Amino acid sequence: MKRNIAVATLTAAVLVGGGLVATAAFADSDSDGKDDRTAAADRAAGDTGAAGRVGVDGAVAAALKAVPGTVTEAERDEDDDDRARAVWELDVYGSDRVWHDVTVDASSGKVLSDREDDGDDRDRHAPRSSAVSLDAAVKAALGAQAGTVTSVDLDDDGDDDDDDRGERAPHWDVDVTGKDGKQHELRVDAKSGKVTVDRDDNDGDDD
């Protein structure tokens, strides 16, 4: 069972058309003449420009270029079983109204595969509109916990097994590896942008 500790609040940014991800928010990490603010955002999201460090923003941009639509989940796999290299695995609800599983090389940013989700293992609905985009959720999480984002996932089902009150408002689950090497699990409200930290009751850390 987990408890949530309030950390910060972000003013929600409403996106035109109810989309969850604005492609314009993601800069090309290889482009010349990148301004300081864009470079700082890349570093915060884990895109340092070094080999093997394509951040979540670069992975999302690559996936959306291959499959226009909405990214609801992006997770970094440090040792992909099929390719023996680090990759980003993304869930994209395409403009064709079909779910796609997209894999992006974490070193080059190249899309390695794009396949339609067969839907055998889960009943998936179209993502609900969110006032807080994936990009905004990542920035809010990093504002509360500095480090590198390794996973971000939209939970808009309203189900939460560790919540005794039952349904919970849609939110983004963001995993951040801190500079100390520890993993931090953050939750960003998809409507308000409020950030909370998930901690196990038995972790002994009451700060």
Image: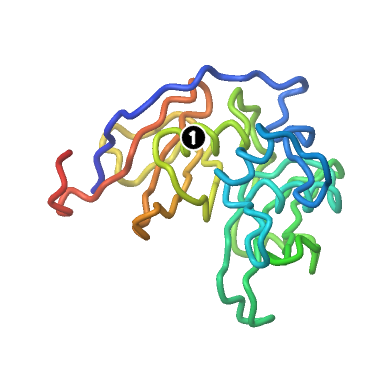
Query: Height in image: 193 above or below 64?
Result: above
Query: Height in image: 152 above or below 115?
Result: above
Q: Quadrant of the C terminus?
A: top left
Q: Secondary structure at mark 1?
A: strand
Q: What amino acid type is highlighted by mark number 1?
A: His
Residue 57 percent coordinates (x, y): 67, 46
Q: Quadrant of residue 159?
A: top left
Seen in the image, is 17 located left or right of residue 147? right
Seen in the image, is 145 located left or right of residue 41? left
Q: Which residue is mark 1?
A: 171
Residue 16 percent coordinates (x, y): 76, 20
Q: Nearer the viewer, residue 42 or 192?
A: 42
Residue 138 percent coordinates (x, y): 55, 39
Residue 103 percent coordinates (x, y): 72, 64
Seen in the image, is 124 located left or right of residue 167? right
Q: Nearer the viewer, residue 2 or 142?
A: 142
Q: Nearer the viewer, residue 158 or 138?
A: 138
Q: Residue at x 68, y 53 (%)?
A: 91
Q: Residue at x 73, y 62 (%)?
A: 104
The local crowd at label 1, few if under 14, some if 14 to 19, many if 20 or more residues have their Cα within 10 Å, is many
Q: Residue at x 64, y 82 (%)?
A: 84
